[in-house]
Every structure is written in structure tokens, then in C-alpha cells.
Image (spheres, rainbow, N blue to C red):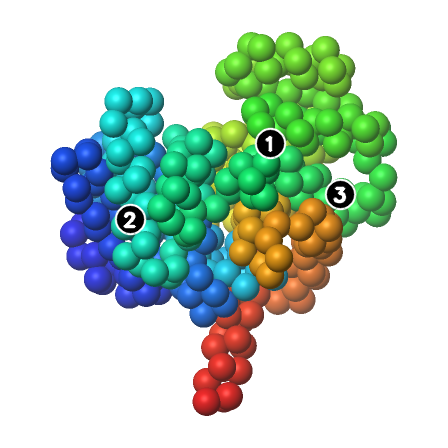
Amino acid sequence: MDKKVLAEAEKRGHEQVVFFHYPQVGLKAIVAIHNTVLGPALGGCRMRLYTDEGQALDDAMRLSEGMTYKSSMAGLDLGGGKSVLICDPAMSQGRREMFLQFAQCLNHLNGRYITAEDMGTSVEDVMVMREITKFAAGFAQDQGGAGDPSPWTARGVFNALRAGVERRFGTRDLKGKHVAVQGVGHVGFYLLKHLHESGCKLTVCDTNAAALERARKDFGATVVDTDAIYDVECDVYSPNAVGQTVNPDTIKRLKCSVIAGGANNQLLDSAMYKEVTDRKMLYCPDFVINAGGIISVGAEYIPGGWNEKWVAERVEKIYHTIHTVLDESERRNKFPEVVAVELAKERIKATEEKRMGAK
């Protein structure tokens, strides 16, 4: 990304991009607020050593835009935001002081942006910020928070996967269906449990040997090398680790009917739309599928606080939302991801017009 920040913000539709710099505690942060029409912008705090500040800015702006669409499609009264801290995620010395300062920065934004744990950050970091700000979500369950969002993300992925299978095979019954699961970390492992209980045949890969052994032992999964997962003949390919695993190299090898997983940015770019369509694969948009986590974290801000029934009902609706996206994809003759973004924007526009009309 070049340094034309305002031009980039205009192109993507961002409302606000804020830079915070407090060298005395090692804080160098970017907060990107994409859209607050539906409500305050909610999105995680990513802690990472970037190759340059342009990469960090691109990450914050791209991910915050995605959060707008994710929350909109999940039916939440929340907007999209993201923050990045440019530092080593493994840092321990001075970590508390840095997060206390970042919490103060959140207070300066006065509720326009609510952060949460993300890559490189944890519930413990959120709890430090909660000492001086209410604008940090995903805090400990024993204090009334949502806790680990992974189980809810996995449940949403499972619901979406059932919808994809039903659309492609005419039944939501997963018994006997072969699912290749890439990544069996937090979300992937919880997903395996749901799939195993549904009678699926499972093939898995991961870089973590202990996680693989647990998947084999607990769920009878077949373990393959990380590169070999693309060659598995299966009904569903479910990416739940790094992004962009569906690319020109792997698409030629994939032997599946449905792509449905919890990873962000599963497709390399929009050029993959035609590749996936030409191979008659059904793609379930990632930001619709993996919304369970944001639903759970966002529930901390509903009247009365986090409520399991409220969360469960909305995560269950992901099944129906996938069907809506696929119906509209056929009606509009557009790729499912394109349609999902359009539907998200349409909800935001309708809310904005209603608000303007009420004035």
C-alpha cells in the first residue's frame, strides 16, 4: 500500500483511521474504523511484527472492512473495525503497561471502536484493558464475558457446512460424508467434534503433532501431511487455519464438491471465483460462515450482557443465512462471496436510509 491513506480510506469506505504512538511503553498502533451505521465498530486487536508500516495499515483496513460485512450478515447491530499493534506478539516485559496505554487510547475513541482478542492477543490481554476501559470484549466467562469464542465459531462453521452439503447433495445428513479439515487448532478441533458426532469420515492436517494425535485418537481421523490435504478425495474441503489456501496451485488438486471452513480470506483473490465455479464447487463465504465468534463476543454488549440462548439462536441462523446467500447467488448469477458483500451493504444502506428518513 502507498502512503495515500485518505485515498485508500475513500476507496474502501472507511470512516476513520487512527494512529497511536507512545514510545515510552512501546505502543505503535493503528485502529481502522470502517463503518458504524449499524452500531459501534467491533473487531479484534492483532499483535504482529510487520515487514513495514504499510503492511500493517493494509491489514487493519482490509480486516476492518471484512468485519463490517461479517457483523451485518450475522444480523448484529455492530459495525466493522480492527486494530493492529506493531510489535512482537511474544513480548512479555512491558506487555501490561502497553495494553493499559492502548486501553486509554480506546477510551479516547469513546465507544466508536470496541476491541477483542485476535492473532497474538489473548483473554489475559483483554482483562488488562478491562481494568480501565469498557471497550474491550471477549473477557473471562467467570466475570460475565463470552470467554473463548472458538466453540461458537466452530458451531457456526458446522451449521454452514450442513447448509452447503444440503444444497449440493439434497440432504443435510452428514453421515458418511468425507470432510477434509485443514487445521485442527481451536476452531478446527471443536468443528471435528461436531462432524464426528454427525458420522462424518474425517481426514485432517496440521503442523501441531499433538493436535493431530488428539484428532486421530478422539475422532478416528486420518492424518495426512499439510500439503497432501489438497489431494484428498472428499465431499467437503474445510480450511480452518491460514488464509488463501484456495489458489491457482491448489485449485487444480482439490477434489471436493463444497468448500466450507472457518479460516479468513480462503480464496487468494477474486480471480478464484471463476476457477471455483468452473470446477462446479460450491463455496460458502468465509465471513458468513465464521461469524459465530463475533456473535458471542458482541453479545457482551446487548442489554443484560452475555446470554447463551441469545448467542445460540443467532449462531444457528448461520445455516439459514448460507441458504439465503446461495439462493441470491443463483438469482443474481453472481459468485456467493460477491452476493454476500452485496447483501451486507444492502442491510447497512437500508438502516442508513431509515435513519435519515426519521430525521
* Residue 297 x/y as whole percent: 55, 47
Q: In this view, does 276 lie above or below 96?
A: below
Q: How crowded is mark 1: few (under 14 residues within 10 Å), some or many (20 or more)?
A: many
- Asked if 98 appears above or below 193 in the picture, the reply is below
Marks 3 and 2, Cα distance to the nearest angstrom?
Answer: 43 Å
Residue 314, disc? none
Q: Tell me if I can see residue 277 in this picture.
A: no
* Residue labelled with disc 1: 187
- Look at the numbered disc 2 and give the secondary structure of its residue: helix
Frontmost of labels 2 and 1 is 2
Q: Quadrant of residue 107?
A: bottom left
Residue beneath disc 2: 104
Identity of the residue drawn at 66% across and 44% down? 156
* Residue at the spot 64% in from the left edge and 35% down from the top edge: 151
User: Residue tagged by mark 3?
Assistant: 162
Q: Which of marks 3 and 1 is nearer the N terminus?
A: 3
Ranked by sequence position, the earlier of labels 2 and 1 is 2
Q: Which amino acid does label 3 sit on?
A: Arg
User: What distance separates the C-alpha of mark 3 from that of mark 1?
Assistant: 16 Å
Count neighbours of disc 3 (C-alpha within 10 A) and say few if under 14, some if 14 to 19, many if 20 or more.
Answer: many
Note whether residue 217 is visible: yes
